[in-house]
């Protein structure tokens, strides 16, 4: 189960074509942060690990047009939101 908490991170552009930027907000520098993209069937497409408020740039070039689910997990607590991938 994921909560949709847009105040915990910024995600742009949405819709996206080549990449999505995910920026955590207000985290401790020592926080372990995991960004994950899932397809509509819940399969993991991509995962990146960082710490603190470091920005993620997630590649969406190989993801087909449609809705994806993007989650941010911080020290074991997950939150997420939908994003749209649109191919030109």
Image (cartoon, rainbow, N blue to C red):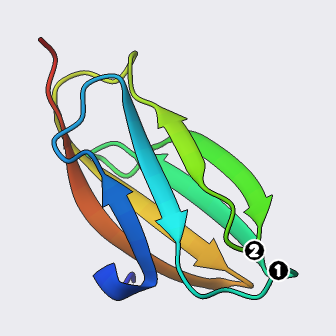
Give residue 20's quadrant in the image.
top left
Q: Position of residue 3 (x, y in %)?
A: 34, 87
Between the residue at mark 1 and the residue at mark 2, the CA separation in whole angstroms equals 4 Å
- Dot 1 falls on a residue whose secondary structure is loop
Query: Quick check: 15 above or below 82?
Result: above
Q: Tell me if 43 is positioned left or right of 24 in this view.
A: left
Q: Residue at x 24, y 21 (%)?
A: 64
Query: Quick check: 10 above or below 49?
Result: below
Give residue 26's quadrant in the image.
bottom right
The quarter of the image holding the N terminus is bottom left
The quarter of the image holding the C terminus is top left
Is residue 4 in view? Answer: no
Query: Quick check: 54 above or below 5?
Result: above
- N-terminal of the two: label 1 or label 2? 1
Query: Quick check: 16 above or below 84?
Result: above
Check if mark 1's residue and mark 2's residue have beta carbons within 8 Å: yes
Q: Tell me if 50 is positioned left or right of 87 in this view.
A: right
Q: Which disc, if any, is residue 1?
A: none
Is residue 76 in view? Answer: yes
Q: Position of residue 72 (x, y in %)?
A: 53, 69
Q: Nearer the viewer, residue 56 or 74?
A: 56
Residue placed under numbered mark 2 in the picture: 52
Q: Position of residue 36 (x, y in %)?
A: 54, 53
Residue placed under numbered mark 1 in the picture: 29
- Dot 2 falls on a residue whose secondary structure is loop
Q: Position of residue 10 (x, y in %)?
A: 38, 67
Q: Tell me if 54 is positioned left or right of 59 in this view.
A: right
Q: Residue furthest top?
A: 88
């Amino acid at each position: 189960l994921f909560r949709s908490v847009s105040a915990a991170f910024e995600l742009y552009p949405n819709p996206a074509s080549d990449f999505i930027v995910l920026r955590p907000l207000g985290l401790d520098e020592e926080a372990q942060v995991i960004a994950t993209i899932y397809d509509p069937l819940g399969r993991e497409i991509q995962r990146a690990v960082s710490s603190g408020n470091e920005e993620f740039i997630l590649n969406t070039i190989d993801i087909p047009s449609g809705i994806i689910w993007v989650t941010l997990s911080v020290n074991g607590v997950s939150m997420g939101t939908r994003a749209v991938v649109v191919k030109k």
